[in-house]
Amino acid sequence: MFYCIRRIGAGRMENYCILGNPNVGKTSLFNALTGSYEYIGNWSGVTVEKKVGKLKENVGQLIDLPGTYDLSPISKDETVVTDYLLNDSFSGIINIVDASQLKRNMQLTVQLLELNQPIYIGLNMIDVATKRGIKIDYHKLMKKLKTPIFPVVARTGKGTKHLLGEIKHLGEGYQPHFKINYDEKIEETIKNMCQIIMTETSHDKYQARFIAIQFLLNNMQIANELNSEVVNKLSSLRDQVAEQVEAVSVRREMERIRNHYIETLLQDVVTYPDEDKQYFSSRIDKILTHKYIGMPIFLAIMWLIFQTTFTWIGTPLSDQLDAFIGGTFTDSVKTIMNYLGVIPFLQDLITDGIIAGVGSVLVFVPQIVVLFFFISLLEDSGYMARIAVLMDRIMESFGLSGKSFIPMIIGFGCNVPSIMAARSIENEKERLTTILIAPFMSCSARLPVYALFGGIFFKENQSLVVLSLYVLGIIMAFLVSTVLTKTVLKNDNAIFIVELPTYRVPSIKTLWRSTWEKAKGFVRKAGTFIFGGSVVIWLLSYIGPHGINVNINQSFLHIVGSFFGMLVQPLGFGTWQAGATLGPGFLAKEVIVSSMAIIYSSGDAGLVNVIQNQFTPLSAYAFMIFILLYIPCVSTVAAIRKETYSWKWTALAVAYPLVTAYVLTFIFYQVGHLFV
């Protein structure tokens, strides 16, 4: 009995996969060909799992796979690629390559060609190559490879319509043809391996050759897909040829031969400009990634973003929306309900529960939109990748590498995708550490809390206050990572290698879609988590041990809030109202604001007045620190469980932030109270 790899390409399903190196525009092309929208970032590590979309014109399905440099995976996201190619059925491959970095991209292309499956090559970023003075004769390259090549600019859609029209013909009349002739001794070993593979499994000679080559390259995933008997036989042959080749290793020799093949292939295909020419990216990188001035520049940019969000544009728009929801809209709903004769219970539920709760969060949508717009601007311009390089020097001191900072940046939008983005980290202990510290990033769900309290107590310096909370989250993440990497997750510092993308003028279409999708997700949450949370909070305030429609001070909500309020009394916000918001905050951090609006059961002006009476600037900042650091929301906890496969680590991810939040807030408030 033996186990074999599922036949590659078996069964013609209209599934096409798109893959290539990180940050070559795979997801941009995916969006252009499917008409859908997946998150795009001008940096590597954005796609960490396969995504499926329906091709336009009903051509079939397109699968967007994570970026990889090699079919021998070293991280969880790269494993997705190899696993798909080995175990899923597909009609063909679309390999997208960066025209401005063609030689390096061809390393993966050659491996895909060795699969001997139907393949199209998408020559992307031809506009960037042209600007750099790089000339590519893709017609000549197409003849050499005997493979169709399509020049495209995925982010603008140029050339994608032609590619879409040709996808349905991918594989028609395809005949396996690609072969690199390795060293004579290696070729003899490959031949012997193929005989074993074809005898012991159901693979044909082309698939067997691919498996043999990958096995010689020490692709562990290939070995894991074969039964032990086959692995032992192939390992014996690999050991024999290792003694015969003169190179350091068989892998090194095969890579040398591949590199020579690629150099010969591109010799009369690609023409490069004068090597002494210094590009704009190189000149500006010397400033933005400078070890002394790079970080101040980053902080200044973030301050400008927060100043625009909370002072210049976002807050004035939020005030207008607040006046509409709390005034005109609420009054109109009340009038309609009175006209229809709606019973008082439902009237109170709708106005004091749903509208007050959901509306109190929706008023912050303009600020969310402004913030997301500028973050998307930084991402699409290529600046965020530079921040990862800048932070690598700092993070090394805390047991991490710059690769961990990429998920942390994604966490500014939402902690869930930031935890998933940790899949791109090769070192398992560093990946786990990143997952555990990611919830300290100030996600958009915390922004309504910052905006509410910052606008009330720190109106003149709101942008600085919010920036300080973002920085505090990063600092706490670094401190916790230091503890983890020196104790339970001790590991050697990893070398951080990242490809810096070209600076580019952000696409208006990309900025709009990115901002819209993030804002839409925020509003969608308002219609689900916040709606449900608002109803529950209002019902708890409406019902008590002595019946229904009780005074809120005799309600179940008061009882629960008093218990939590007693626990947080030393932190400076020990009222039952503040205590009652902490539990719902586990559902979603936005529910904290909606809960306050319901508890104080008045318009937003009344909410502001009550908060001013119950908090001081010191206790307000202490409250925001606690909200920043305490337990992650339920969606984040679920993501941690999924990515760690462990209830132990999940429990730790819930418990230690709560303890950290309590201790730090206690110290801040008690020390601050001595001076204020």
Image: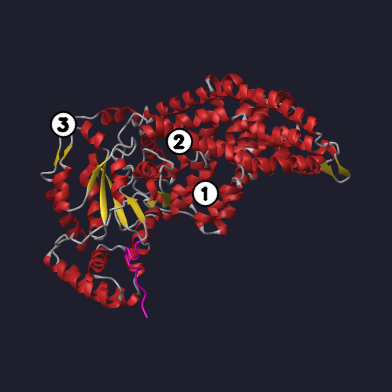
Dot placed on the residue nearer the N-terminal end, 2 or 1:
1
Q: Report x, y in % for residue 565.
A: 74, 39
Q: Report x, y in % for residue 553.
A: 83, 37
Q: Which mark is residue 276?
A: 3
The residue drawn where x is 33% and y is 30% is: 290
578 displayed left or right of 237: right
Quarter placement of the C terminus: top right
650 displayed left or right of 341: left
The residues tagged by marks 2 and 3 sit, at their Cα atoms, a distance apart of 37 Å
Q: What secondary structure is marked by label 1?
A: helix
Region of the chain picked out in magenta, as a range: 1-12
Q: What residue is disc 2 on? A: 514
Question: Would you identify the image quadrant in which residue 113 lies?
Answer: bottom left
The front one of 334 and 323 is: 334
Q: Report x, y in % for residue 248.
A: 18, 61
Magenta-colored stretch includes residue 258: no
Q: Do callouts 2 and 3 mark residues in contact (Cβ within 8 Å)?
A: no
The front one of 645 and 398 is: 645
The residue drawn where x is 78% and y is 38% is: 346
Dot placed on the residue nearer the N-terminal end, 2 or 3:
3
**What is the three-letter code of the residue carrying label 3?**
Asp
**What is the three-letter code of the residue carrying label 1?**
Leu
Quarter placement of the N terminus: bottom left
Q: What secondary structure is marked by label 2?
A: helix
Residue 383 visible in rendering = no
Q: Which mark is residue 436?
A: 1
